Image (cartoon, rainbow, N blue to C red):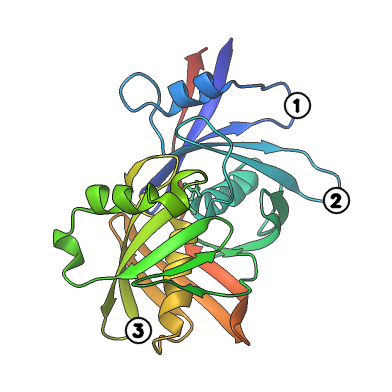
Amino acid sequence: MKLTFYKYQGTGNDFVVLDNRDQTIQLSQEQVAFLCDRRKGIGADGLMLLQPKEGFDFEMVYYNADGRPSSMCGNGGRCLVAFAQFLDVVEDQAYFIAADGPHQAFLKDGLVHLQMKDVDAVEDLAEATFLDTGSPHYVKQVEALEHLNVFAEGRAVRYLDRFQAQGTNVNFVEHLPENKLFVRTYERGVEDETFSCGTGVTAAALSASRAGYESPVHIRVLGGELQVSFEKEGHGFKNVFLIGPAEQVFKGEIRL
Ligand SMILES: N[C@H](CCC[C@H](N)C(=O)O)C(=O)O
């Protein structure tokens, strides 16, 4: 089978993106893992299908690099909105359905503003917080983040008894001046550090709001800059937006 694909990246979190409006694409776990393989395939942190869904501009189907279906991907969602505009499926606004429910999004000044799900509560753990922003996130504040072995430290948390079965993403956050954070993330399903994690920086910003960070929080990641805006609602958050660039890198064909 010859497969036409597009490669997208959002602050260095990168994706194989497939137009499945004709609903002919059916991929096995092994095929998705092959397409995401950085040595033998195209190489990506994840793979997304854009496909039709009654009542929505499109449906987002997301797979982690391990080939397994995943929960919500914030950077992926932003890239898929940009892809939908490229395909003329949408103009500068989108309403789509993903693993964690419906999402509004709009494109403005070259950035994609993606509304994330409301967050009901943030759980306090011994030396971290845990919250679900569409995907599960363990958030730990650290100093001197650039020197941290994120792979080793992240992997250790991801395989703790509590997270062994379902896994979690692990975010290490350094509080910077002027309402800014530096975030590095070990991602479940990639089982490595990625250059950016959209649901992760969202979790980091909401957690930091309890230490006085105000909306919008500016976040530096290895792959660039993102913003997260939100409104507090009791112990939770609503009108949460993840804002940043989403670029098409290349189009290609591959035989499966
Ligand atoms: N690896 C995540 C999904 C992708 C999240 C990340 N790429 C993002 O931008 O939110 C998980 O299995 O929960």
Q: Position of residue 91 (x, y in %)?
A: 69, 54
Up/down of 256 relative to 137, above or below: above
Up/down of 253 relative to 93, above or below: above
87 left or right, relative to 249: right
Reading the chain from its start, which is encountered first: label 3 or label 1? 1
Residue matched to label 3: 179
Q: Is residue 190 visible?
A: yes
Q: CA distance from mark 2 to mark 1?
A: 17 Å
Q: Amino acid at mark 2?
A: Gly
Residue plotted at (60% across, 78% down): 237
Residue plotted at (59% across, 48% down): 71
Residue matched to label 1: 22
Marks 3 and 1 close (CB-CB < 8 Å): no
Q: Amino acid at mark 3?
A: Asn
Which of label 3 and label 1 is nearer to you?
Answer: 3
So how many labels did they put on this image?
3
